[in-house]
Image: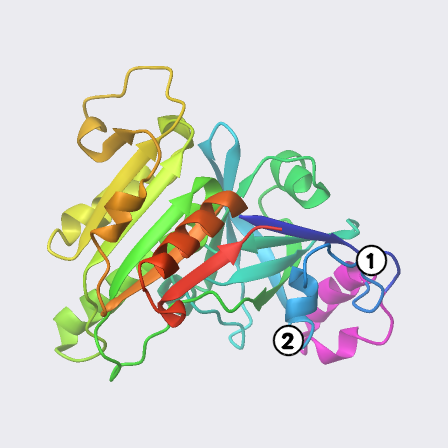
């Protein structure tokens, strides 16, 4: 999932507040020379991602330490973030500052917070588009490329140990899987922690509905299937393809439905203990959030992230 906003002038008097480590400060200066938080082009929506993170002062240096093709149109990145003050909640995005590029990217994190805690890494998956940050990632980014990141967003799942157990229904379309995969991975980490320690948050059941054009554009299939197989009593998935033109492999067939995710499938999971997280193209997000409200799901139990 990606968001972008154009920055028109240079930033002055901001670098000293964002980073204290010498190496990171050097990167910040290089990166933030090209940015302005006070002269941003306004989005046609109520707020854009830079407006929503403008009060977050921590901008952390990051280095690309891994890259791979997740699909014909999506490239994944692993970023090393040494600053231990940097953290995020499962489902949040980052502002993505690239030295020499005056457009700031906004990409949802697809890894679990646990990966950052243990290895100081986060993962992104970026779809190819003509937006400068996505072009840079697909065409110019290399191992050891240096960027800067800032976390933001109020779309997240961050239960506390004493919170009541909740079931989760995750509804994803296309690269909208990114923040929902982060939530799915975080939920699995919470379940492992409780199983190992006998304490911590008790997660309910999790059902992932995920739709893409075809099976090659269904991202992270192996990661999803591994979690389903590790926790069959907790995690289930239903993958949908809407424009499949080739035969579906025998390995994938048990998980794949041809056609869109339907209202009836979602209705079967409505309960007072269930939270719904939706991320995908705006028409899809609008449709399912409205249908859930029409079926008397409380608004506070419906969380959605809209694309810019």
Residue 246 position, x and y percent, is 34, 15
Residue 29 position, x and y percent, is 78, 66
Residue for badge 1: 34
Determine if residue 264 is in view.
yes
Residue for badge 2: 56
Q: Residue at x 79, y 50 (%)?
A: 100
Residue farthest to the top, as pictured: 246
Which quadrant of the view contains residue 14? Answer: bottom right
Residue 170 position, x and y percent, is 33, 54
Label 1 sits on a secondary structure element that is loop
Q: Residue at x 78, y 67 (%)?
A: 37
Which quadrant of the view contains residue 94? Answer: bottom right
Q: Residue at x 26, y 31 (%)?
A: 257
Q: Between 64 and 185, which is closer to the camera in this rendering?
A: 185
Residue farthest to the bottom, as pictured: 162
Residue 40 position, x and y percent, is 80, 61
Q: Is residue 261 left or right of residue 71?
A: left
Q: Between 83 and 285, which is closer to the camera in this rendering?
A: 285
User: From the viewer's perspective, is residue 12 above or below residue 216?
Assistant: below
Boundaries of the magenta span: 11-35
Which badge, 2 or 1, comes first in the chain's sequence?
Answer: 1
Determine if residue 281 is in view.
no
Q: Is residue 283 left or right of residue 9?
A: left
Label 2 sits on a secondary structure element that is loop
Q: Is residue 131 left or right of residue 290?
A: right
């Amino acid at each position: 999932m990606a968001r972008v906003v154009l920055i028109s002038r240079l930033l002055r008097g901001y670098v000293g507040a964002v980073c204290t480590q010498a190496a990171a400060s050097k990167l910040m200066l290089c990166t933030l020379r090209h940015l302005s938080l006070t002269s941003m082009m306004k989005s046609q929506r109520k707020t854009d991602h830079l407006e929503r993170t403008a009060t977050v002062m921590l901008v952390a240096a990051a280095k690309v330490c891994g890259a791979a093709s997740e699909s014909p149109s999506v490239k994944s990145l692993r970023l090393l973030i040494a600053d231990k003050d940097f953290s995020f909640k499962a489902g949040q995005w980052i502002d993505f500052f690239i030295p020499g590029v005056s457009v700031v990217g906004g990409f949802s994190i697809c890894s679990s917070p646990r990966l950052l805690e243990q290895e100081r890494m986060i993962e992104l998956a970026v779809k190819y588009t003509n937006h400068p940050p996505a072009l840079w990632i697909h065409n110019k980014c290399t191992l050891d490329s240096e960027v800067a990141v800032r976390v933001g967003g109020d779309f997240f799942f961050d239960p506390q140990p004493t919170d009541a157990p909740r079931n989760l229904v995750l509804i994803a379309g296309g690269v909208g899987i990114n923040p929902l995969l982060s939530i799915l991975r975080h939920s699995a980490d919470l379940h492992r922690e409780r199983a190992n320690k006998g304490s911590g948050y008790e997660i309910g059941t999790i059902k992932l509905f995920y739709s893409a054009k075809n099976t090659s554009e269904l991202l992270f299939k192996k990661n999803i299937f591994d979690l389903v197989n590790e926790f069959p009593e907790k995690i289930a998935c239903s993958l949908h393809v809407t424009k499949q033109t080739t035969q579906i492999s025998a390995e994938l067939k048990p998980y794949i439905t041809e056609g869109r995710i339907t209202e009836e499938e979602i209705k079967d999971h409505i309960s007072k203990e269930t939270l719904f997280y939706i991320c995908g193209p705006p028409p899809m997000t609008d449709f399912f959030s409205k249908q859930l409200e029409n079926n008397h799901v409380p608004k506070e139990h419906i969380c959605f992230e809209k694309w810019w």
